[in-house]
Amino acid sequence: MTTGNINWDLVAEGVERARRRIVWKPYGAPEIIDPEHSAFHSANIQPPWEVPRKMIVQSAITGAFFSKRGNPNQPISVEEILDSARECAANGASAIHLHVRDERGYNVLDVERFRAVVEPLREEFPGISIDGCYVCALDGEWENMRRALEERLLDAVPINTTAVFQGDALFAKPVPLLLEKTRMIIDSGTKPIVAVYADSDVSNADRYLFRSGLLDAGQIWCLLPALPGCSPMDSPRQMIDGLLRISSLIRDVDPDAKILVCGAGRASSYLATVAASLGLHLRVGMEDTVWRWPHRSEKLESNLQALESGKQIADILGRDVATFSEYRRIVGLPEKHEP
């Protein structure tokens, strides 16, 4: 028998003194535990959490980064992007986020390619909200962005307040371009989305967009961590610490922010689950990750598969996936797209 360093004679004496009974004084009898009240006052002692019932689950169809080498299922062509977006819209996505690619599979700001995806979606799904990235990386794309904004092609456009090494590429938005693009988005009547990848991006947004008066409280924020070069989330602890820190920083800048967390990188579905538990909104899909789970090697088969996972998370947590019109109300868009 293992005795350790315990004084068993004293233990035996204590058992006898306690008469082999726990200490039990039910002062609130006849209730042992009332889950909501104390016998001594009328206030609710376990009120419901302040978690929004409605949760955005946006589908991000394809981004600027991953190729079919990273995931053979990645939508690249206009037809693939449209088919995937249509499938997600038909199966309960709150909204759609788009990029388009050129013939080689690279991200491109091509108004006609955007229109080839957006117009059929709007026709088939009245009231759907579509946003997307106008990234001006090539000659002529700034003018393409101006044209797309003037035509009100999309409901909302992200502003990337960033300077990061994403993978092996430097992605930096010079401050003059950041300010001018924000002005152009606002003047066109399109909704800005503040897109951040790391802590410093929140500070950039604060210094240049909010303190300057270009933006006020209540903006949509898109938080995209966990990709190489973004806020690192290489373990569950890093993921939780990082998400709490960045979301808190955003609240410091914009207390009324609507925060959309991307289930990105290896963190993928785990990040989405924690974000939903915190009462935040989700963006899921093949723009932000190639993996279904952080600890396994299976790749996403489709954007619909990512959407269904997001919907399951919402269901398990007792939150309802926002409809097209509910999404518009949450983020402050008019009921229908107005070109």
Image (cartoon, grey):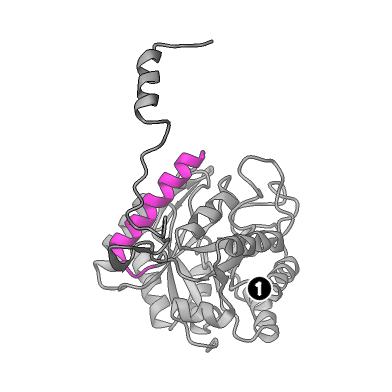
Residue topped by disc 1: 92
* Closer to the camera in the image, 5 or 172: 5
Is 71 displayed left or right of 241 in the figure? Answer: right
Which x, y percent locates residue 129? 56, 78
Which x, y percent locates residue 237? 46, 40
Which x, y percent locates residue 36? 40, 64
Residue 242 magenta: yes
Would you identify the image quadrant in which residue 11 lies? Answer: top left
Q: Residue at x 58, y 68 (%)?
A: 58
Q: Is residue 21 above or below residue 321?
A: above
Is 25 displayed left or right of 228 in the figure? Answer: left
SS for dot 1:
loop
Q: Which residues are magenta?
A: 234-257
Residue 308 magenta: no
Please tell me whether the stretch drawn in magenta is mainly helix, strand or loop. helix
Query: Can the viewer see residue 122 in this picture?
Result: yes
Q: Residue at x 45, y 76 (%)?
A: 331
How crowded pointer 1 is (Cα within 10 Å; few <14, some 14-19, many 20+) is rated as some
